[in-house]
């Protein structure tokens, strides 16, 4: 019996979650097929040696001429992201449309009579524009780095202060280049919502900045799962109850991939809890201070003594920026990690942040450069409490047994929406 080939083609796929999503949703083996050059993509399409594929950047338009039949919606959009091989004939669809429409709907983003700014001019732009247009948007603006093909430059877009919804369709901020952001969401006083089709990390820098100012946000991971479910229907010919299947699959996969970061006062038990929590959930445990020591070749008290706190905070920020890009981890952070705003965004980009609280008299102080007990420790707690509160998704009480604390952390994490 001939082996069926299901998979994803694109120029770069190192960041892709599609394999785990499709294999859980559709129950079939799914391959990632990187095709770095256009010539390779064309050769792949000419062979037609697949049962069904998804298509991502930058080939959603390139594949259209190879399709014998293109769904009217995909044809109108001018982009195909799903192709099914039926007896040698290729059928092209666009499940990104349904996926993005789903994302907007579940986050109560209504395009009717709104001014929408779409970032980027690639294949996904056309899909998003179609959803916005069909949703009754009053004005749809486009911005790009070059400003070509009628688009605004980002500087020009920042002058449109009436923008109410921003949608990013570019790879900006996507793994591994996290932390990048092309414009400041606070420059738009009428802004109500920011949506980003990037799905790794869960929250891009653009979304995190918008979230800090109370703006509704929605990330591409939910869209990715939704479009995969719609694609799986084409792949298998089976009907799925999408409104129940998509959120269930999204939640399960997000919790599988998400990080849990522990913050709190020095000596509050983050490392002990983190190691036990990682074991309980089958995640990788990382102690941020230990990683800094490994990278620098010096222990932390020596770094403080020789180079000062400012140098340590640079090491801390650089190390955390690398670690927080990864997924499936429990990260125990140093007590002062929240002093650097970029650190907080790094922790929040891929999961939950728990503030570990322990009575002041029970905090361990040995070998801690900034935590020597007494009045100084009390002052340190007073200074940092507002920062811990602002950074955390929830509080984790560490005044009972380790087992009880870990189980409480699991309950908080599993109840967290994450997205």
Image: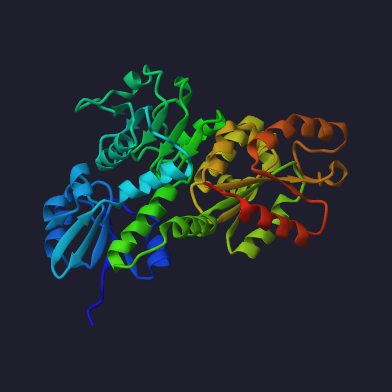
Q: 98 or 168: nearer the eye?
A: 98
Quadrant for the N terminus, please. bottom left
Q: Residue at x 84, y 44 (%)?
A: 359
Query: Which residue is the extreme one toward the bottom?
Result: 1
Does 175 sit left or right of 213 as displayed? left
Does 188 sit left or right of 403 as displayed? left
Q: Is residue 306 above or below residue 101?
A: above
Q: Position of residue 404 (x, y in %)?
A: 77, 60
Q: Is residue 265 above or below residue 307?
A: below
- Residue 137: quadrant of the picture: top left
Q: Can the viewer see residue 221?
A: yes
- Residue 130: quadrant of the picture: top left
Q: Position of residue 95 (x, y in %)?
A: 30, 52
Q: Can the viewer see residue 60?
A: no
Q: Is residue 47 above or below residue 109?
A: below
Q: Position of residue 89 (x, y in %)?
A: 13, 64
Q: Residue at x 52, y 59 (%)?
A: 252
Q: Is residue 212 above or below residue 12?
A: above
Q: Position of residue 305 (x, y in %)?
A: 70, 35
The count of marks equals: 0
Q: 10 or 275: nearer the eye?
A: 10
């Amino acid at each position: 019996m001939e082996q069926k080939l299901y998979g994803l083609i694109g120029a770069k796929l190192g960041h892709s979650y599609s394999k785990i999503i499709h294999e859980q949703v559709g129950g079939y083996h799914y391959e990632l097929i990187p095709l770095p050059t256009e010539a390779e993509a064309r050769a792949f399409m000419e062979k037609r040696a697949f049962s069904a594929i998804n298509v991502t950047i930058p080939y959603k338009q390139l594949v259209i001429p190879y399709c014998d039949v293109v769904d009217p919606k995909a044809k109108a959009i001018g982009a195909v992201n799903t192709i099914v091989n039926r007896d040698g004939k290729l059928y092209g669809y666009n499940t990104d449309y349904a996926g993005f429409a789903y994302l907007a709907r579940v986050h109560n983003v209504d395009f009717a009579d709104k001014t929408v700014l779409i970032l980027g001019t690639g294949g996904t732009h056309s899909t998003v524009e179609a959803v916005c247009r069909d949703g009754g948007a009053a004005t749809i603006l486009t911005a790009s780095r070059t400003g070509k093909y009628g688009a605004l430059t980002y500087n020009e877009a920042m002058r449109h202060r009436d923008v109410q919804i921003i949608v990013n369709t570019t790879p900006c901020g996507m793994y591994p280049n996290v932390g990048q952001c092309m414009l400041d969401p606070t420059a738009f006083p009428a802004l109500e919502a920011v949506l980003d089709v990037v799905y790794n990390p869960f929250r891009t820098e653009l979304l995190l900045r918008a979230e800090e100012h109370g703006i509704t946000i929605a990330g591409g991971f939910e869209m990715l799962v939704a479009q995969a479910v719609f694609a799986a229907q084409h792949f298998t010919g089976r009907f799925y109850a999408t409104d129940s299947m998509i959120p269930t699959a999204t939640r399960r996969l997000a919790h599988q991939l998400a990080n849990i970061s522990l913050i709190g006062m020095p000596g509050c038990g983050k490392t002990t809890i983190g190691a036990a929590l990682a074991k309980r959930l089958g995640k990788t445990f990382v102690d941020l201070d230990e990683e800094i020591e490994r990278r620098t070749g010096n222990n932390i008290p020596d770094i403080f003594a020789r180079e000062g706190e400012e140098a340590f905070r640079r090491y801390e920020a650089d190390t955390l920026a690398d670690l927080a890009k990864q997924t499936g981890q429990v990260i125990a952070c140093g007590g002062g990690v929240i002093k650097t705003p970029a650190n907080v965004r790094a922790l929040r980009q891929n999961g939950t942040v728990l503030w570990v609280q322990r009575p002041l008299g029970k905090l361990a102080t040995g070998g801690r450069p900034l935590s020597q007990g007494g009045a100084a420790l009390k002052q340190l707690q007073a200074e940092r409490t507002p920062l811990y509160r602002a950074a955390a998704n929830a509080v984790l009480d560490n005044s009972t047994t380790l087992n009880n604390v870990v189980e409480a952390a699991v309950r908080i994490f599993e109840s967290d929406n994450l997205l």
